Amino acid sequence: MTKKELIAKLNDLEWEDFEVKEAKASVPKSCWETVSAFSNTSGGWLVFGIKEIGKSFEIQGVNNPEKIGQDFLNTLRGEKFNVFIDTKQERYTIDDKTVLAFYIPVSAQKPVYYNTQANTFIRRSSSDQKARKNEIDAFYRDQTFGTKTSELASNTSKKDIDTTSLKQYRDYMARFNPDVSYNRFDEDVFLSKLRIVDNNQLTYAGLLFLGKRDTIEKHFPDFRIDLLEIEGKSISEATSTYSFRLGEFENLWDYYFECFKRLKPEVDVAFQLTDQGFGQELSPGLKAIREALVNMLMHADYFAPSHSRIRIFTNHIEFYNPGGLPKPIEELKAKDLSLPRNPLITKLFRMVRLAENAGYGFDRIEANWKTYNNTTPEYDISFDATILKLYTYAQEENKEISDNNKNNFGVTVEKLRRELANQKLNKSLINSILNTGFDGFLEYLEAEFPKTSEKLRSNFGETSEKLRRGSAKNSIQLLMLMESDGSTSAEKASAILAVSSRTVETYIAKLKELNIIKREGSDKLGQWILINDDL
């Protein structure tokens, strides 16, 4: 049988962190490496009575389950390991054969080893690997890393879960991860198996992820995820501290969607339907931003005095996270290591396909952002914080091109002024556009195309500040070009807007989808027309 079929039978188990051993007549010696590896990494299930053959599994069963189970547990509670290892046990009968499963949790007292410190193991993908000296040293430095949010939040219960968030989370899981076993369980079992609730109390992870804000603040008085939009390339350049600041929301699940909603307009997005009929937004820039956001929420130190913060500047996005990395960033990137600070929060994101099963995501962020706009993310790493910067526009190496684009756009505004004059529109409106450029065009749209203006604000952001950012600004500038020169091509527009022709085509597709523009005539000789629904 396949691994998926096996796990379907053992429906207490999930895909990640899973190891099988034959153990037909006795406890196999190789299992101690796995116990050490699970204890030192992020926990996992060790299953006796199953033989792995390539990528397939054969259920053989254990001959004497009582003796093998007791031998295994007695060893864990004895002198073999340097720390006591608690476990959760399950027993299954499949095809008249007995299978034993033991859940080995991540330890708060790492490193965990047997006999001597040289027998310290860590989990890498699906294998156990002996830890190196520097990795063992790191365990001693970070003995509470990866365990704190797995502890129980005192004086909490299921009643402290926000019911709306829980419903939305389960609906999202059913939609985007329909095959996962958790979808089959009733609410109490669901909460228990995901360790949102444990021993009738919420874990810190469950409380932060789905809890009610009032209860969260009893344990985390300054709970919030900050998001600021700043009109400038830096704080010193900005005319005010911020033009927008995210308000308070219930929990991490709510914060994820609210933050993503504000980040999404900063990148260009194409839309298409999946084979199942679901809408999906395609953009390497969007993937990079989503990965960076989830990465921040999964790996934050929620017990630190500072809190996670996103700052959206006019030329870059900055993700700040309290809490240092468990290893040097070069090693995390090179080996794609999965050492989450908050394993339960990480799992909750994984179970709805908002996070990958391995690593910190640095490689995926970098690859997608490089594909998106050919810039490289920057990192500022300290022992107690991590900062990631994604530049939305090219830096100094493109300054000459940017200056040319500004000059070209000045010509475009002048052309627009002449075009409006030819249409014998009122002089005050023409002067407004001439003197204020982008803002003047917004006024022109509001006056002459109110329904078009309404569509733009509805889809790109209601405030003028939002319309002056990212893809919203470029889409509106493209409308300026089309209104001044209906024969504008994607190539010509891309030179003026400082984006690729393909990106311009994405803007055009979006504007056509919103029924704001249409093409009259042939592709070669035709004209772009702003649709006036108000006539």
Image: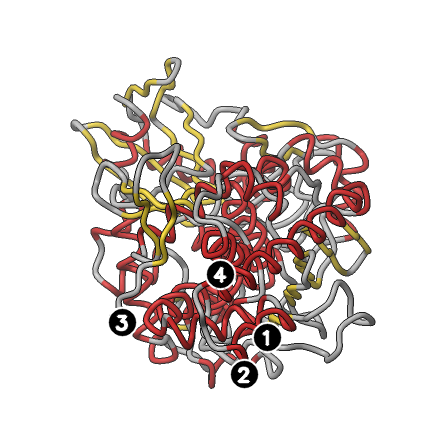
Task: Give residue 260's mark.
Answer: 4
Tell me which label, 1 or 3, sits earlier in the chain: 1
Which residue is drawn at the image coordinates 33% and 18% (left, top)?
56
Quarter holding the N terminus is top left
Quarter holding the C terminus is bottom left
Query: Residue 162: x percent and y percent?
Result: 36, 76
Check disc 2 and give the amino acid type: Glu
Residue 352 seen? no
Which residue is drawn at the image coordinates 58% and 28% (left, top)?
128
Label 4 neighbourhood size at 10 Å, few (<14), some (14-19), many (20+)?
some
Name the residue that disc number 3 marks: 534
Which residue reaches farthest top? 54
SS under mark 4 = helix
Query: Residue 166: x percent and y percent?
Result: 32, 68
| Gap in angstroms between the C-alphas marked 1 and 3 | 24 Å
- Who is closer to the viewer here, 29 or 349? 349
The answer to whether mark 1 and mark 4 are in CB contact below 8 A is no
Mark in front: 3 vs 4? 3
Q: In this view, does 215 lie above or below 469?
A: below
Question: Dividing the picture into quarters, in which one does residue 409 lie?
Answer: bottom right
Q: Is residue 224 above or below residue 181?
A: below
SS under mark 3 = loop
Mark in front: 1 vs 3? 1
| Gap in angstroms between the C-alphas marked 2 and 4 | 23 Å
| Gap in angstroms between the C-alphas marked 3 and 4 | 33 Å
Mark in front: 1 vs 2? 1
Which residue reaches farthest left? 95
Name the residue that disc number 1 marks: 431
Name the residue that disc number 2 marks: 217
